[in-house]
Image (cartoon, helix red, strand yellow):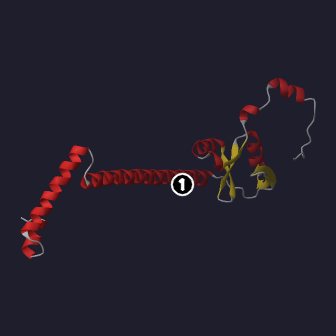
């Protein structure tokens, strides 16, 4: 078993027995005076400071862990959205019809097939952005993506905005040219 520091210093010849007793009594006197006056001893003050530092460090660690967890969840969400878009995108090969839409306050143009154009207008298809590419995806997939990350869906027409039968009959009197494009 190891000896106390006092015993080790006396054995090494660095302190005398009288110096050891004097240090011991002065420590006892300080403790008694601190207890009578209600003050904390240096040791108690240091212990309180260490506890405060420990609590502050634990709070910093919790905050850092929360930020890391948020970042991990955001990356997982981005990966899910990317996978949904890539696996469900429709090919636009041979598309000659222009489809214009607004993205970040700019009018963009995308070439799609005639069938895709009509489905986009009816709300059966939607446009999603992946990086800098605009991809055509089915509307049910677009709604799943919008739940996870709404900013990934560039354009999705609302089916509920269709005309009622009365409104359609009223417009039936007017012929719309086949080549009309906005």
Tell me the quarter of the image containing the N terminus: bottom left
96 or 161: nearer the viewer: 161
Residue at the image position 77 percent from the left and 32 percent from the top: 162
153 or 139: nearer the viewer: 153
Residue at the image position 61 percent from the left and 52 percent from the top: 85
Q: Is residue 56 above or below residue 3?
A: above
What residue is disc 1 on? 79
Residue 20 location (% of width, % of height): 11, 65
SS class of the residue under badge 1?
A: helix
7 or 123: nearer the viewer: 7
Q: How crowded is mark 1: few (under 14 residues within 10 Å), some or many (20 or more)?
A: few
Q: In this view, does 2 lie above or below 78?
A: below
Residue at the image position 52 percent from the left and 54 percent from the top: 75
Residue 179 location (% of width, % of height): 90, 47
6 with respect to 180 (left or right): left
Residue 176 location (% of width, % of height): 91, 38
Residue 59 location (% of width, % of height): 40, 50
């Amino acid at each position: 078993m190891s000896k106390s520091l006092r015993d080790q210093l006396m054995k090494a010849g660095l302190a005398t027995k009288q110096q050891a007793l004097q240090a011991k009594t002065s420590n006892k006197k300080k403790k008694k005076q601190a207890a009578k006056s209600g003050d904390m001893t240096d040791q108690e003050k240091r212990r309180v400071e260490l506890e405060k530092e420990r609590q502050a460090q634990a709070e910093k660690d919790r905050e850092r862990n929360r930020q890391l967890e948020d970042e991990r969840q955001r990356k997982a969400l981005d990966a899910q959205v990317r996978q949904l878009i890539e696996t469900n995108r429709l090919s636009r090969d041979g598309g000659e019809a222009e489809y214009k839409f607004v993205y970040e306050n700019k009018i963009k143009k995308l070439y799609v097939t005639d069938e895709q154009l009509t489905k986009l207008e009816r709300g059966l298809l939607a446009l999603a952005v992946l990086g800098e590419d605009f991809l055509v995806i089915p509307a049910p997939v677009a709604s799943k993506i919008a739940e996870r990350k709404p900013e990934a869906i560039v354009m999705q027409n609302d089916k509920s905005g269709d005309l009622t039968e009365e409104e359609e009959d009223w417009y039936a009197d007017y012929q719309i040219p086949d080549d009309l494009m906005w």
